[in-house]
Image (spheres, coloured by chain):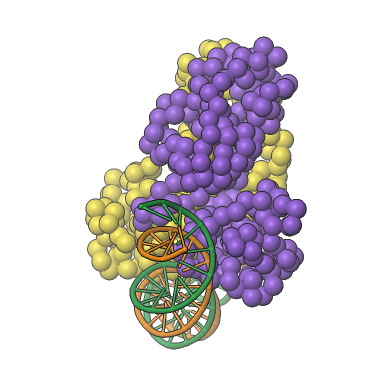
Chain colours: A yellow, B purple, C green, D orange
Amino acid sequence: MSKCESCIVKEFNSLKSLTRDELVRISACKTGKTYDKGRVIFEEGETINGVYCVKDGVCKLTKLSENGKDQVVKLVVKGGLLGKRSLVTNESSSLTATALTEMEMCFIPKAEIMDDLQKNANFTLDVLQKMTEDLKESEHSIVNMAQKPVKKRMAEALLYIHDSFGTDEDGYLTIVLSREDYASIVGTATESAIRILSQFKKEGLISTSGKRIRIEDANALKWVE
Amino acid sequence: MSKCESCIVKEFNSLKSLTRDELVRISACKTGKTYDKGRVIFEEGETINGVYCVKDGVCKLTKLSENGKDQVVKLVVKGGLLGKRSLVTNESSSLTATALTEMEMCFIPKAEIMDDLQKNANFTLDVLQKMTEDLKESEHSIVNMAQKPVKKRMAEALLYIHDSFGTDEDGYLTIVLSREDYASIVGTATESAIRILSQFKKEGLISTSGKRIRIEDANALKWVE
DNA sequence: TTAAAAACATGATAAAAATCATATAAATCA
DNA sequence: TGATTTATATGATTTTTATCATGTTTTTAA
């Protein structure tokens, strides 16, 4: 199975929904691209006529707030899709996608998929299901942002990254982020993010090596107030 | 056209997607119910096997935070649907729905709709489109909660309610909420919500009559920092 | 390799918001 | 209706968080 197929399959869980032919046709997208770390893949307001499929690397989806700061809305890793929304609306993107590492991606033009969306109701249902999960996660974030203090949000962000994206052989979080990125995930000032991470370090909840972070006491992190 | 049909039509814009027969069958749902103000329609964790269609009244969708406070995720008025997610997953509801006024609703069992979801790809696409809008709104909320101060969020909440749900003949907001509900929308302590509304009143941005609120200076509200 | 830039760190202070306390007004119902 | 609960209001205080300042380390690029 080609790399592309595996993306589509992971995201849409659509082995059962797309026929062999449909899969093969979609995965014949040769427009594989590489993005350097820090590179913007697409920007808020840009029209993207298709979905990007992450073959390797990590990127962040951000939204610019009126105060000029970016807010991270979602992190996407291998197997994830960017631009799902563009399949359904003709509106321009409401998010900016930026590579956090070297990335390998392929692009599937909207036209390729629209056909399946219109003809294959089960596939559309799968997309719907994915969207539903995104929505649930998003609503969970609203509650967190609205009701939890910054320190707790930071603790949960670390645990989330640990649980969702794993660690390397030395136990460090696979995803390596700048303090500014952490601030942007948690929704706080960069200095505050730095301060909290320093405090966690002092208290032995995490340790660091350069930018890399290792969770030393997941349980204590869970109970951070 | 029956009331039920008009709900479905408004929410899913599905005149074009559902056939006359499908619409008639769905709108044959006789399980109309009335809910008193304050009444819980369904709760987080509850299994709801269908969608509720709001014929009249207003309700809030909330999610319980770990600090014990409810966070309002969405307000739903006439023509809106509750429980869309239940069509796609079998998971229990992640939200609680509570009537904010007297409400008239009807319930459409999942089984009635599933058939269309599976057979009518255009209808599914419509649902997908609605979900996409919800997701976009939800992501917008994340950014607001994370990046904007409470006073600004309150100002925007007032404007949102004004613009989305309108005013009565005296210019007061159609939707009448308690201070606690405002706190729960904005994501702050009830006392803080009360204080901010008092301040807005003092500054002439709003006026009140009992619980009712009238926006006096929408432009100034827009520029609240 | 070294100079410049960017990221990290931390102190001091100010601003925002939560909490605690208490008082009054309004709504509910026995 | 009058008593009791609930909602609104506001002061005093503490806690949380942002901002400003400044130094250090790390990265980047000439």
Using the image as rendered, state which of residue B168 and residue B162 is in the foreground.
B168
Residue at the (70%, 42%) spot, across then down: A92
Q: Judge whether B127 appears above or below A148 on screen.
A: above
Residue at the (64%, 61%) spot, across then down: B213
Using the image as rendered, state which of residue C30 and residue B33 is in the foreground.
C30
Q: What number of labels is visible?
A: 0
Using the image as rendered, state which of residue B187 and residue A45 is in the foreground.
B187
Residue at the (56%, 55%) spot, across then down: B177
Which quadrant does the C terminus of chain B fall into?
Answer: bottom right
**Where residue A9 sits in the image (x, y, percent)?**
48, 24
Image-based side of A204 in relation to A52, left or right: left
Image-based side of B136 in relation to A89, left or right: left
**Where residue B92 sits in the image (x, y, percent)?**
40, 32
**Where residue A151 sits in the image (x, y, percent)?**
37, 63
Q: Judge whether B55 appears above or below B119 on screen.
A: below
Which quadrant does the N terminus of chain B fall into?
Answer: top right
**Where residue A150 sits in the image (x, y, percent)?**
41, 62
Q: Is residue A122 visible?
A: no
Q: Judge whether A116 appears above or below D3 on screen.
A: above
Using the image as rendered, state which of residue A149 and residue A64 is in the foreground.
A149
Q: Is residue A188 visible?
A: yes
Residue at the (70%, 14%) spot, across then down: B20
